Amino acid sequence: MLKMFPKTHITIVAAATVVVTAAILMSPSADVEAKRMSYTVDLEQGIASEVNREKSSQKPDATLTPRASTDPTLAKASPEMTPEAASEVQTTVEPNSKPEARLTWQSFDIKSGDTLSAMFKKAGFNDGIMLSVIHGAGDAKTLQRLYVGETIRFATNSQDELAAVELKRSLLETLKITKQDDAFDGQTEIRVPESKPVYASGTVNGSLYTSARKVGLNDRLTMELSGIFGWDIDFVYDVRKGDQFEVVYEELYVDGEKFGTGRILSARFVNRGKESVAVLYTDSKGDSDYYTPEGNSVRKAFLRTPLNARISSPFNLQRRHPVLDVVRPHEGTDYAAPPGTPIKASGNGIVKSAGWKGGYGRTVVLKHGDNITTLYAHMSRINKKMKSGLRVKQGDTIGYVGSSGMVTGPHLHYEFRVNGSPRNSRTVKLPDAQPIPASEMARFNKITGQQVAQFEAFRNNYQHLALASED
């Protein structure tokens, strides 16, 4: 039969057959083409999002591309659920790749007086199931701690069995408990918000807090600002009208929405014409602190004051005693504050004594190195942890303001002694904290150099905008 055709014809037909066969094999069917999609993948969140779907005259197979439904008829209410509880339930059906693996979710907001047992009963589950959940692996036991404002969700499978529990504590923290075989396992997921640097600048006109609020700083950031420079500036007495401040701080965003504010990244404060600059630096060990651009710590070895309060009686070696009415040296500084106000350790040290000390009342004495001691008197109560020999850190609460001992009203009496001699704690030169070590300076200069440049760029842009608005 083949002999009837010329060899050239046979060759052409064979070549055409190969081409057509290859085209058929390489071209997808209409059904496959209908399911082709493009996605973007968020590696941190583990979420794939559809970007574009190619056109097709064929409809996709519904069993392969199911959609979530909010139709309440798709979610069965538990037979144990009261009508009132059922009215609170928000039901959603979240599909997986297989129809039989779909989960039905019920959601409840935690209100005052709610208990975990009550939440399980609202969802239709008894205490036995609740115990099996909180006795599960991982972080499952933390489900027992409920707080007003949180949201708890329960998921059931197609057999109406509990398959998962989620407790949303905040925008950033969610406890997820899933059933693995016959046991539950809990994991806490922490989201990291996106951080954006923001600049604010202002001039003190009245109090620092009102001036800071006018330029968008909240009270927490203002407290942090005063804490950064609080070793050199007494923000109760030293701040004057006309003082200037500038800060670059973090604004935090979740899913594009502003979540809150983070840390101060760099700051500048001009007090009575004297400029102080600080930048936040995290060293190679992960420890963060504020330093000058030259690498010196803005923190001192001691707090200038152990609490923020007005001075009721200053350091005065010729003062007349208010109770005894005789001239007796006042070897410390008195700070008037409401009873119960926390008192902080002004520096790292060791408890030398803690207890009743004559006219001082309830008193704690701390020893700092070989030559410095600080004394905190007239407390209403002493922190129970304060025992002789205990090591304390700067900022630790050692007691609370009171009126014990020989006093006329509640206040803290604070003494600062060098080699046993009393010194005015508000004017004594305080030793600096440790600077950046030489081994860290190259890394410090590189990182903080970028921060200072960012700070200057924000400032210049702000000044240009201010000048433009005046024209």
Image (cartoon, rainbow, N blue to C red):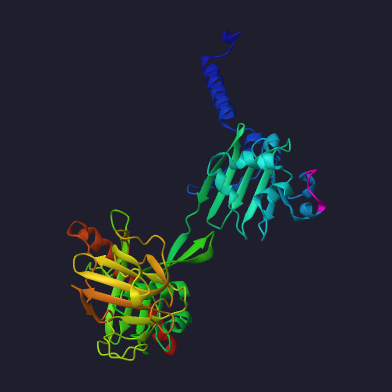
Q: Residue at x 66, y 53 (%)?
A: 115
Does the magenta run of residues contain 82? yes
Question: Where residue 282 appears, x then y in whole percent?
Answer: 31, 59
Q: Residue at x 35, y 71 (%)?
A: 363
Question: Where residue 361 appears, x then y in whole percent?
Answer: 38, 74
> Going by the image, does 322 lie left or right of 421?
right
Q: Nearer the viewer, residue 89 or 398?
A: 398
Question: Where residue 283 appears, x then y in whole percent?
Answer: 28, 57
Q: Residue at x 61, y 8 (%)?
A: 1
* Location of residue 287 (image quadrant): bottom left
Residue 458 in sight here:
no
* Location of residue 103 (image quadrant): top right
Residue 396 in sight here:
yes
Q: Nearer the viewer, residue 375 or 327?
A: 327
> Going by the image, does 334 lie left or right of 219?
left
> Going by the image, does 44 lie left or right of 78?
left
Q: Nearer the viewer, residue 124 or 67?
A: 124
Can you say whether 177 is above or below 369 in the image? above
Q: Nearer the viewer, residue 286 or 200?
A: 286
Decide whether the magenta segment is chiefly helix, strand or loop: loop
Question: Where residue 356 appears, x then y in whole percent?
Answer: 36, 70
Numbered range of the magenta stretch: 78-83
* Location of residue 446 (image quadrant): bottom left
> Going by the image, does 113 lie left or right of 422?
right
